[in-house]
Image (tube, coloured by chain):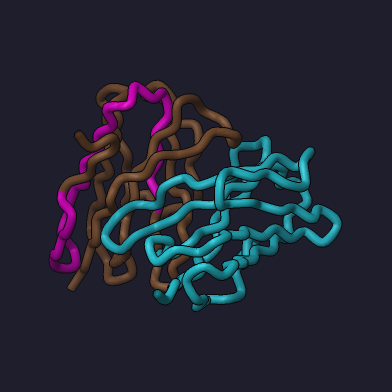
Chain colours: A brown, B cyan
């Protein structure tokens, strides 16, 4: 009965391919996030959606496009994958938007670009 | 731009002793601080938080201390247990929704 789930858990692909990572939360939260954990282990926010609307869009290449079909889902599409995109991507959710709410994280998706 | 720093990548303590994990930040706009715990192959889970209007928050074996003048916070775990072995992330946020994470400290509690 996972609160925040991501698929796939592992993703290995060639440079130049297009791939998607799916995220779903069953907590009834309004806000969802995508984070990238780079090789130095820093967790960096990429996007935040509140009720299907984009509220945070950090400086990420426009090859990354989040899509929120409903407030329980926030999928991450990545076009023309590059070697530097290899990382662990975490989805998270919080009850409401804003900086003072704990976030619940998914298990992560390890993306390896060859 | 590392606004949140955890300078110790790892920490090893004996079971029953105190674990102290440290975190420093540079952005004076941060006014809410959180600690997350992460086991291998899992996402981070929320542990404890503190608002900048307080200097201490306690929850069972976990206490977070905030020193605003030094821009420093610490997480104390006492007594430490083997199940506490994990990576601990410090995070800080500001009213503009900007949450930043440190690189984490790997805590190992030896039986």
Within the magenta stretch, is there residue A15? yes
Residue A7 is situated, as x and y percent measured from the top left of the image, at 17, 46
Query: Residue A26 vs residue B80: left or right?
Result: left
Residue A24 is situated, as x and y percent measured from the top left of the image, at 25, 34
Q: Which residues are magenta?
A: A8-35
Residue A57 is situated, as x and y percent measured from the top left of the image, at 48, 42
Total marks shown come to 0
Within the magenta stretch, is there residue B48? no
Which residue sits at x=40%, y=52%?
Answer: B44
Q: Quadrant of the N terminus of chain A?
A: top left
Query: Residue A102 vs residue A28: left or right?
Result: right
Which residue sits at x=60%, y=34%?
Answer: A100
**In the depicted view, which residue is nearer to us: A13 or A37?**
A37
- The answer to whether any part of residue B10 appears in the image is no
From what the image shows, is residue A109 above or below residue B82?
above
Which residue sits at x=63%, y=61%?
Answer: B4
């Amino acid at each position: 009965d996972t609160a925040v789930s991501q698929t796939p858990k592992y993703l290995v692909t060639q440079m130049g391919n297009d791939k998607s990572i799916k995220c779903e939360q069953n907590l009834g939260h309004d806000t969802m996030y995508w984070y990238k954990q780079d090789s130095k282990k820093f967790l960096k926010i990429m996007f935040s959606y509140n009720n299907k609307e984009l509220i945070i869009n950090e400086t990420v290449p426009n090859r990354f496009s989040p899509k929120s079909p409903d407030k329980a889902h926030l999928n991450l599409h990545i076009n023309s994958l590059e070697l530097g995109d290899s990382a662990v991507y975490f989805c998270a959710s919080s009850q409401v938007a804003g900086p003072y709410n704990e976030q619940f994280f998914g298990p992560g998706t390890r993306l390896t670009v060859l | 731009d590392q606004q949140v720093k955890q300078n110790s990548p790892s920490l090893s303590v004996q079971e029953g002793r105190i674990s102290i994990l440290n975190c420093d930040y540079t952005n004076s706009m941060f006014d809410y601080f959180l600690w997350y715990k992460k086991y291998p192959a899992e996402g981070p889970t929320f542990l404890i938080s503190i608002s900048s209007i307080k200097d201490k928050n306690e929850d069972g074996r976990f206490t977070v201390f905030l020193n605003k003048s030094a821009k420093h916070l610490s997480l104390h775990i006492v007594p430490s247990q083997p199940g506490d072995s994990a990576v601990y992330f410090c995070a800080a946020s500001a009213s503009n929704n900007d949450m930043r994470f440190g690189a984490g400290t790997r805590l190992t509690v030896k039986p």
